[in-house]
Amino acid sequence: MRIGEIAALVGVTPRAVRHYHHQGLLPEPVRRANGYRDYSVRDAVLLARIRRLTELGLALDEVGDVLADDRGRELVEVLEELDDDLARQQELLTERRARLGAVLEQARSGRLPAEGPVSPELAELFGSLAGEAAGRPESATAAKEREVLALLDTVVPAGDRDRLLGAMRRMTEAPEAVERVYEVYGLFDALADVDADARDPRVEAAARALAGCIPDEVVAGLGEKGASAGEGGSPFMDAFFAEFHPAQAEAVRRALRLVAERAR
């Protein structure tokens, strides 16, 4: 048989056959006088076995390990590892479908935030704040906060994220808490044209207002770490402060120092 014939018989492409030759999985057959490969039934049997193994999900190097062990012991080990890997993939797919379902529900109900997709917990928090924001002037600081929260929702470990969002949700449920949050937004929006080096009293006012809005349970987790959080020193913090006007950045730094002192 020529390469096209054995490929058609086994149900693979001639390119795949050549690749298996290159990988050392399928030995090169003898060649006819005209230079064409001449495949035997034995070659077809081996090629069919390679196809079955790859369809099970084995990588080509694993297929090579299986083919090198005539007793089949290696095949059992590899298939057990493959079964464990497929089980993990199945769990991951189940989790992904659950998250996708939540995002679809947000989209279908018109509740998908502009920063989405985000976790259902953050989407709920955004939704409650949006309801409170109805009729209020648009705040650049509020929009920036939403972007940062969407970032943290993605990069913070799930346990820490749940604690953070839980604390923020309870904060918004406290009497007049949302009113205080929007007062902070207004104070920070007003700092957009303030010179940070002038030590304008509005910087201190914004810092104290922000520190007062951060829940005690979040403050308690800051400790000494919170004392240095406002000093930068990490790529994320440097990029975070670069997003603010200098006076706003200084107010955030002062607020972090205040909450760190409160945690001691």
Image (spheres, grey):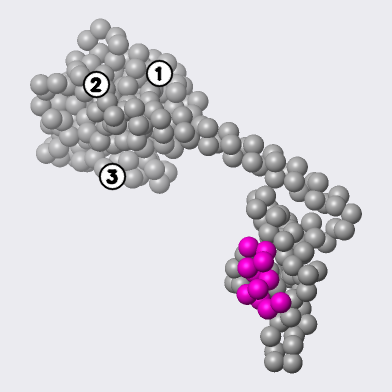
In percent of width and height, residue 84 lies at 69, 39
Q: Residue at x 29, y 29 (%)?
A: 108
Residue marked by disc 2 = 129
Q: Nearer the viewer, residue 122 or 10?
A: 10
- Tag 1: amino acid: Gly
In percent of width and height, residue 138 lies at 13, 30
Q: Nearer the viewer, residue 262 or 67?
A: 67
Q: CA distance from mark 1 to mark 3?
A: 28 Å
Q: Looking at the picture, does residue 213 appear above or below residue 88?
A: above
Residue marked by disc 1 = 166
**Dividing the picture into quarters, in which one does residue 170 lie?**
top left
Residue extent of the magenta highlight: 1-11
The local secondary structure at tag 3 comes to helix
Residue marked by disc 3 = 242
Q: Residue at x 39, y 43 (%)?
A: 236
Q: Looking at the picture, does residue 247 appear above or below residue 51?
A: above
The local secondary structure at tag 2 comes to helix
Q: Farthest residue in the right direction?
A: 71
Q: Residue at x 15, y 26 (%)?
A: 186
Quarter of the rendering occupied by the N terminus: bottom right
Evaluate if marks 1 and 3 touch, with contact meaning CB atoms under 8 Å apart: no
Q: Looking at the image, is mark 1 or mark 2 earlier in the sequence?
A: 2
- Tag 2: amino acid: Leu
